[in-house]
Structure formats: structure tokens, C-alpha cells
Amino acid sequence: MRPSRSFLFGAMLLSTQFIPEFGLKKGFFYSIFHSISAFCNAGFDLFGNFSSLTGFSSNIAVILTISALIIIGGLGFTVWLEIYSYKYKGIRKIGRTIFAIFKLEVLDSIQ
């Protein structure tokens, strides 16, 4: 699955929990909003009183979906492109990326 579409899958999973709780229209909106918010790691609160998703702290489906979206979004498109390249084109391109990241880290530590 492409990372750009993963928030849609996350919205579908979240809608199974939010629609019974908030109704069709509001639950669907909340599921899409929280899915995109988690993918971008934005941390917006729609429920008010700074409660965010604390009402769902015991709901394993919500917690795992939000956690997966944060991780997938946090990796970034460049990393997912490298994973795709590794899967379909082999390991030779990964070595260049690791060297480039190492070089950037060394240069950042010098400055």
C-alpha cells in the first residue's frame, strides 16, 4: 500500500469505531480528520477540553490505527520510495541512501 493512501485505509478502520459512537456524518468526518491528522502527526483535538482521543484509550482498534498512521507518516515519502526500490530493484540503491544519510549526519555534527 502506498503511504499516500494509507490514511484512507486508516479512515476506514477508524470509521468502524467512530460511526457507532457519533453517527454517520460526524463519525465519518472524525475518522477522516483523525486519520489525516495522525498521518501528518499534527495532533489536533476535535473533541474539546484538551481530551483528544483519551476517551478511546482502551479501544485497541483506535490506538493501533493511530499509532500505525503516525509511524507510516513519520517515515516520510523518501523512505517509502527506498523501500519500494529495494523491494523491486534490489539492494544497490539502498547503499547509496545509507551513505547519503550518514554523510548528512556527519556534516550536521560538524557545524
Image: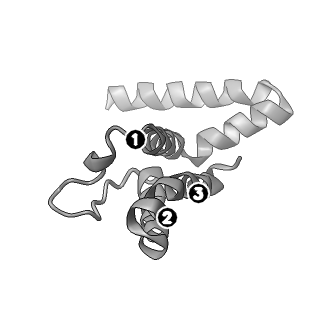
- Residue ID at (31%, 32%): 111
- Residue ID at (31%, 40%): 57
Question: How far is mark 3 from mark 1, CA to CA?
Answer: 16 Å
Image quadrant assignment for residue 21? bottom left
Measured from the top left, where is residue 30 in percent x and y? 42, 65
Other residues around mark 2 within 10 Å, as few (<14) / some (14–19) / many (≥20): many
- Residue ID at (50%, 44%): 65
For numbered disc 1, what is the local secondary structure? loop
Image quadrant assignment for residue 27? bottom left
Other residues around mark 3 within 10 Å, as few (<14) / some (14–19) / many (≥20): some
For numbered disc 2, what is the local secondary structure? helix
- From the image, tell me which residue sits under label 1: 59
Query: In front of the other: label 2 or label 1?
Result: 1
Q: Left of 90 or right of it: where is 111?
A: left
Q: Which residue type does callout 1 highlight? A: Asn
- From the image, tell me which residue sits under label 3: 12
Measured from the top left, where is residue 40 in percent x and y? 44, 54
- Residue ID at (43%, 24%): 106
| Image: 32 above or below 97 | below
Give the camera-side residue of 22 and 101.
Answer: 22
Q: Which residue type does callout 2 highlight? A: Ile
Other residues around mark 1 within 10 Å, as few (<14) / some (14–19) / many (≥20): few
- From the image, tell me which residue sits under label 2: 32
Measured from the top left, where is residue 77 in percent x and y? 59, 48
Q: Which residue type does callout 3 highlight? A: Met
Q: Earlier in the sequence, mark 3 or mark 1?
A: 3
Q: Earlier in the sequence, mark 3 or mark 2?
A: 3
Measured from the top left, where is residue 59 in percent x and y? 40, 41
Q: Earlier in the sequence, mark 2 or mark 1?
A: 2
Residue at the farthest front position: 20
| Image: 96 above or below 58 | above
